Image (cartoon, grey):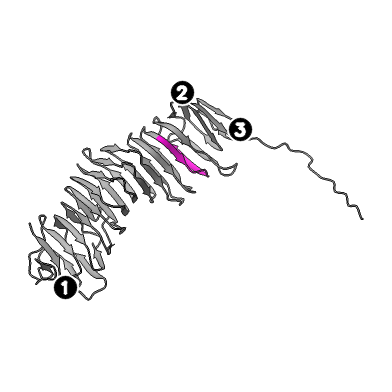
C-alpha cells in the first residue's frame, strides 16, 4: 500500500511507464505504476505546464483510491478503458473524455464519493458501500451491480440513466432528489433492493423519444414525469408509489399488461381536447390495474383504455374518452358546445 503522485506533463497512464509516478508530491519520477492497493493523486505539484493536463488511459487501471485535487485534468479513456477503485473517489477540475459505455469508475469497496459538481459521466457500484459526500452528477449512467450499495446520504443525484442489476445490490435514496435526464430505458430496476425514503425521482427529458420506467416491483415515494415529453412512456413492473404524477400534456403512457400500479395519490391528464393524455395497456385488450386505497382520484382530459381501477378510492376522469375495456372509473365525456346560428346583428347609430 503506497501513495502514487503524477508528475510531469501530459502522457499515457499504462501498465509499465514509471516516468510519471512519484512517491511524494512533486517528487522524482520512477515510482512503480499504481496497483489496486495504492492511492493515486493528481495535485498541484505535478510541475506540468499543460493546461489541461491530458491523462490518456492505455489499459484498464486499478487503485485503492483516486483524488483529483489540483491541476485542470482531461482524463481520456479512449472509449474503452475504466478505473477500478476499491476506496474513495474525489473529483476536482477534471473532465472525463470519451468514456466507455460501461462506465468510468468501477467501485469495488467502501467508498466516499465527492465530485465537487464535476461530471463523473458513468459510475458502476459493484461492491462495498458508496456514500455520497456531495451531489453526484453522472451524465451517462449510474449502475448498482453485484453486491454494490449506493447511499445518497440525502444529496441530490443527476443521472442520464439509472440501473440496478445485481441481486445483492441495494439503493438507499433517503430524501434525495434524483433527476433522470435521459430517454430510452431511463430507469431499469432489474434486481436488488430499494429503500426510497422520502425521495423524489424526477424525469426531465422533454424530447419526442420513447422512454421506459422499469420499476422492478419496488416501493417508491414520489415519481414525477415532468415536462412536455411526446414519446411513449412505458411503465413496467407492479410498483407502489406514494405519489405518481405526469405533468399535464399530450402524452401516451403505456402500462405493462397485467401489472398493478398502487398509489396513494395520482396526478395524470391533459390540458384540453388537443392535448389529452392516453393511458393504455401494453397489450390491447389485456387489462392493466390501478389501485388507490382511499380518497378521490380525479383526472381530466384522458383517453382511457383497458384500465381497471380499484382499491377503495373513487376514480373520476372528466372531459375524457372511454376507449374501451375499462372498469372502476366514472368517465365523463367532454362537453361539446351546442351548434347553431350564432350570427350577431350589429346596429350602428350615428350621433
Does residue 334 appear in this view? yes
Residue 212 within the segment the image draws in magenta: no
Give the farthest residue toward the top.
312
Circle 3 residues within 10 Å: few <14, some 14–19, many ≥20? some
Give the farthest residue toward the bottom.
49
- For image coordinates 43% across by 37% down, the residue present is 244
Helix, strand or loop for the magenta stretch, by majority: strand
Task: Give the side of residue 170 with respect to residue 341, left or right.
Answer: left
- For image coordinates 59% across by 44% down, the residue present is 274
Q: Quadrant of residue 53?
A: bottom left
Residue tagged 2 = 312
Q: Quadrant of the C terminus?
A: bottom right
Residue tagged 1 = 8
**Up/down of 245 relative to 45, above or below:** above
Q: Nearer the viewer, residue 216 or 349?
A: 349
Residue tagged 3 = 333
State which mark lies toward you, 1 or 3.
Answer: 1
Amino acid at each position: 500500500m503506497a501513495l502514487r503522485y503524477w508528475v510531469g506533463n501530459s502522457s499515457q497512464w499504462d501498465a509499465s511507464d514509471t516516468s510519471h509516478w512519484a512517491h511524494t508530491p512533486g517528487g522524482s519520477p520512477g515510482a512503480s505504476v499504481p496497483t489496486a492497493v495504492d492511492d493515486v493523486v493528481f495535485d498541484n505539484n505535478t510541475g506540468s505546464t499543460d493546461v489541461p493536463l491530458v491523462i490518456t488511459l492505455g489499459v484498464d487501471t486499478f487503485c485503492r483510491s483516486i483524488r483529483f485535487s489540483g491541476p485542470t485534468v482531461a482524463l481520456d479513456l479512449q472509449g474503452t478503458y475504466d478505473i477500478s477503485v476499491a476506496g474513495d473517489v474525489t473529483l476536482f477540475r477534471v473532465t472525463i473524455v470519451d468514456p466507455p459505455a460501461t462506465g468510468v469508475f468501477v467501485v469495488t469497496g467502501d467508498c466516499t464519493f465527492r465530485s465537487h459538481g464535476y461530471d463523473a459521466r458513468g459510475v458502476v457500484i459493484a461492491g462495498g458501500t458508496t456514500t455520497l459526500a456531495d451531489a453526484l452528477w453522472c451524465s451517462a449512467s449510474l449502475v448498482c451491480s453485484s453486491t454494490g450499495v449506493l447511499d445518497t446520504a440525502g444529496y441530490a443525484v443527476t443521472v442520464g440513466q439509472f440501473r440496478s442489476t445485481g441481486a445483492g445490490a441495494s439503493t438507499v435514496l433517503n430524501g434525495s432528489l434524483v433527476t433522470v435526464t435521459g430517454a430510452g430505458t431511463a430507469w431499469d430496476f432489474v434486481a436488488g433492493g430499494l429503500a426510497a425514503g422520502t425521495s423524489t425521482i424526477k424525469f426531465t427529458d422533454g424530447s419526442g423519444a420513447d422512454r421506459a420506467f422499469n420499476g422492478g416491483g419496488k416501493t417508491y415515494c414520489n415519481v414525477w414525469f415532468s415536462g412536455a415529453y411526446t414519446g411513449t412512456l412505458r411503465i413496467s413492473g407492479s410498483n407502489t408509489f406514494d405519489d405518481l404524477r405526469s405533468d399535464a400534456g399530450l402524452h401516451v403512457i403505456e402500462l405493462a399488461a397485467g401489472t398493478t400500479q398502487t398509489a396513494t395519490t395520482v396526478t395524470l391528464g391533459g390540458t384540453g381536447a388537443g392535448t389529452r393524455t392516453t393511458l393504455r395497456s401494453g397489450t390491447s385488450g389485456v387489462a392493466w390495474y390501478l389501485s388507490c386505497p382511499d380518497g378521490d382520484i380525479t383526472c381530466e382530459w384522458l383517453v382511457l383504455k383497458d384500465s381497471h381501477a380499484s382499491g377503495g378510492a373513487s376514480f373520476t376522469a372528466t372531459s375524457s374518452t372511454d376507449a374501451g375495456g375499462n372498469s372502476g372509473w366514472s368517465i365523463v365525456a367532454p362537453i361539446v358546445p351546442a351548434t347553431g346560428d350564432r350570427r350577431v346583428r350589429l346596429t350602428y347609430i350615428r350621433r
